[in-house]
Amino acid sequence: MTLLKEHDLGTSESKSETIVHVEIDGIDVSVPAGTSVMRAAAIGGVDVPKLCATDRLKAFGSCRLCLVEIEGVRGTPASCTTPVADGMRISTQTPRLEKLRRGVMELYISDHPLDCLTCAANGDCELQEMAGAVGLRDVRYGYAGDNHFDAPADDSNPYFRFDPSKCIVCSRCVRACDEIQGTFALTIAGRGFGSTVATGGRDFFDSECVSCGACVQACPTATLEEKSVISLGVPRRTVITTCAYCGVGCSFKAELRGDQVVRMVPYKDGGANEGHSCVKGRFAWGYATHKDRVLHPMIREAYTDPWREVSWDEAISYAATRLKDIQSRHGVASIGAITSSRCTDEEVYTVQKMVRAAFGNNNTDTCARVCHSPTGYGLSQAFGTSAGTQDFRSVDQADVILLIGANPTDAHPVFASRMKRRLRQGAKLIVADPRRIDLVRTPHVDAAHHLQLHPGTNVALMNALAHVVVTEGLVDESFVAERCEADSFAAWAEFAARPENSPEALASVTGVPAEDVRAAARLYATAPNATIYYGLGVTEHSQGSTMVMALANLAMATGNLGREGVGVNPLRGQNNVQGSCDMGSFPHEFPGYRHVSDDSVRAIFEKEWGRTLDNEPGLRIPNMFDAAIDGHFKGLFVQGEDIAQSDPNSKHVAKALSSLELLIVQDLFINQTAAYAHVFLPGTSFLEKDGTFINAERRINRVRPVMQPRNGKHEWQAVCELANAMGYPMHYENSSQILDEIARTTPAFSGVSFDLLDKVGSVQWPCNEKAPLGTPVMHVGSFVRGKGHFTETPFVATPERANRRFPLILTTGRILSQYNVGAQTRRTENLRWHGEDVLDIHPFDAEERGIAEGTLVSLASRVGETSLHAHITDRVPQGVVYTTFHFPGDAANLVTTEFSDWATNCPEYKVTAVEVYPKSAKAAQLDGEQSVTHSGNVTGESVVRMANQIADIFEYLGEQEGTARIVNHLRRFWSPAMRDELARIAAGGEAALSPLALAAAKEVVPPGALAPH
């Protein structure tokens, strides 16, 4: 399309349900009461001239350009600050108004450089446009007096320029930073003629500015201008698409000249972001055309050989031939694939289809395994579906927000801005986090409670909160009686009320004072609307799934589900984590979270795909690694995920990848995983993709290509060609046909199509006959599963604990300017803010070890060691250290361990016992402690560890029921090979299985049914 300029109505929308009728320039207009005259006029087709007003900010009334005449009203009031009244008769164009407006505009222009023809904003400048609108032809005041023409420009920010010589001091940038972003980094300094926009630092880069771009977008002149516009010129056409960074899923206008992106502008009609953005989505898109992009397929015989560039046909044929050869020698289950949460739904769907139909097994998993797989498990147990309950707008109605294990100002900044806005309006915030994140105390936001718990004690804290709710009569009895299972609630309430779950009893475990827990519980339970938002600090634990169920328990017990302002809401880490799970990437589920053992579901896909499909779960990612080291798993297709950097215990991952006979990587760059690859298939950036992403609120957004694939082929096309070469016919004319197939086979998506999304913008699943425009809020009236299910959640301490040799606990996270493993952001100017991973350490711990600010330190655990520079801060408590994982050279995952969530194998990134010491120091005390050695049976070691961990979770049920629950879990989620291995170990007495795990191991595979070893 041509350049899309969204209509700016000048002031925000009134929420009143009362309608008033006015006459504007002889036009009858009906609008909600409280609507400004300016907005009413715009709705009626009359745009009143304006400079300080914009419909994304509160009315300000400073530019005096929007004056109108109102019958019966003295003077010429500003239309932006004057609300309509029923029967008003308004004139926006009279000789008197024209004269006043020209006079105001003359004053602006008299102190503005007359360089329009050479200005970067020529043709895209509101001041220029308004000068024409008011009919300004000359300036009577001349240009000889005092002015600001020589004010020096600020080029410190890598993405935009601040030129104060062109500033009209409208305050839009200041107000955008305050009202939209909530950073309060800008102000107006001085008075009168001396008024200027100031940052509070030496320059923009040195200030509190987070480079979200809100000020640039709000600026009506070239005062704040993207450097890309200055360099390339004003864009000429627009493509509406979706950001490929975090799970917020912001909609953007990609503005181009030809096929060259000039800038990305947040789309005002975007359902998730409503015109706001962060530094990554707004500015960090240059990686798509970075010189490191690999644009041609490559192959090699061994991963130690040099790459050889080949044609697509040769690469596909080579990969297919080797995959078929592996299966002929090692069996159907010897190969598999990992899908990417950075790819579109359509691309992910084709990969899992290739695995099931062309590979003939269910060995498909996704990088969501290492982040939000416990969300899928926990929420499905409680509510019946594996997704968050609300849309982002819902937080506007929240009275209390429980934020646990999430740092949205860094990881989900656009949603954080919305949350902060609600907090400034008076909502209360409870933060549960080992670190003092920004939201504990930030401008105009002060958390009511910061529950600074010890890492790994989430479930204990939730049990303490539940104890208060149950024992103090804070349960919403009517909600529970109407919406939830009576028996599971009764069992949970009895469990929660036990003395051992009281805040006092658990204070020594969590480190949180009992009185703080009680106050937070009362605040949450008594609020009209209380909501929960959580992140990877909940899921990436040994009890991640238990914790998700504990959150669901709390929300159900207090009646905080099924309406706006409440709910249980996971903040997803990557742009399509939700979608990759929805599309059937897990080894036990088809698209739509339907188990592979369900005959009726399998029949749907067998009919659609024309293949008999496996009815048993396949291997998860960590099981693939173990089987590769053991020699049973030989071929792997990795779509858009750098598992060698992102997955825990990097040495173990490297050993697994180096053990493969064939590793196929489909990606943009040669990353750490591709170092072990035999085939490299170049991928496409989001600017080349055509499909859909699904964000954290279940919103299905269109991803539209702004250019043709630079590699010559869409990723789904390459996957289809690989499937075809393996003997399974798989063909689509375009990606819309893939979504049509998803809709035919997946009830929650039955109403979704490109045509619908192009018409309405976006929808939230379920989108079907019952909800043709989607479902913003889930579980209204009833849960998907019928009655809500409560689960008892005994706290089981992680086996990963601090000790004399490793006395500190490492936890990990993200930072605003970088993203995931950094493959994208490290190839942008975002490096200016964060050029390496650093280790946060408490002053006491640093002093005790002789560590100063910036000291290069060794970070060591029992599995590995890496080096980082130290940052001394009290944001982390004593005994806890923290780092990010954005840089491969810093290799934080060299020290993370094999421990994982009991139900889903999501790695326990948030708890690793470590020691820190200056790099120059000797560490004799660590000698012999670090090891990645295994016995000859890595899979056996893993299944014993996992079985014992599951047994610990169900031990409270007793032997009979506990055994039955374990057996059911193993049959539902473990592959037959893993179950056989466990049964074989139990039969041979080869390993230390707990009594409950041993009982389950003997029952999970009937006697005599063991497959040959």
Image: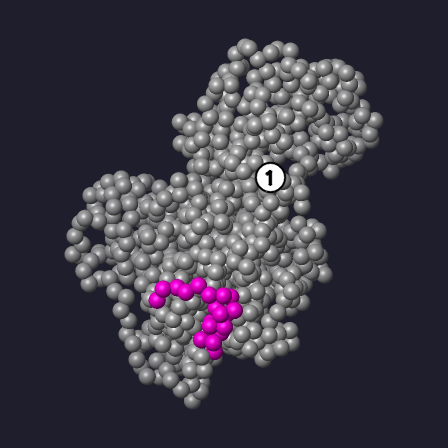
User: Looking at the rendering, in which quadrant would you find the C terminus?
Assistant: bottom left
The one of 49 and 70 positioned closer to us in this rendering = 49
Category of crowding for the residue at label 1, using alpha-carbon neighbours closer than 10 angstroms: few (below 14), some (14–19), many (at least 20): many
Q: Which residue is tagged 1?
A: 235
The overriding secondary structure of the stretch rendered in magenta is helix
Image point (22%, 57%), residue name: 805
Which span is picked out in magenta? 305-324
Res 583 seen here: no
Image point (59%, 50%), residue name: 706
Image point (31%, 63%), residue name: 651
Left/right placement of residue 449 relative to residue 735 reads: left
Amino acid bearing label 1: Pro
Left/right placement of residue 423 relative to residue 454 reads: right
Left/right placement of residue 32 relative to residue 883 reads: right
Res 757 seen here: yes
| Residue 44, image x, y percentages | 77, 33
* Residue 742 located within the stretch drawn in magenta: no
Image point (42%, 85%), residue name: 1010
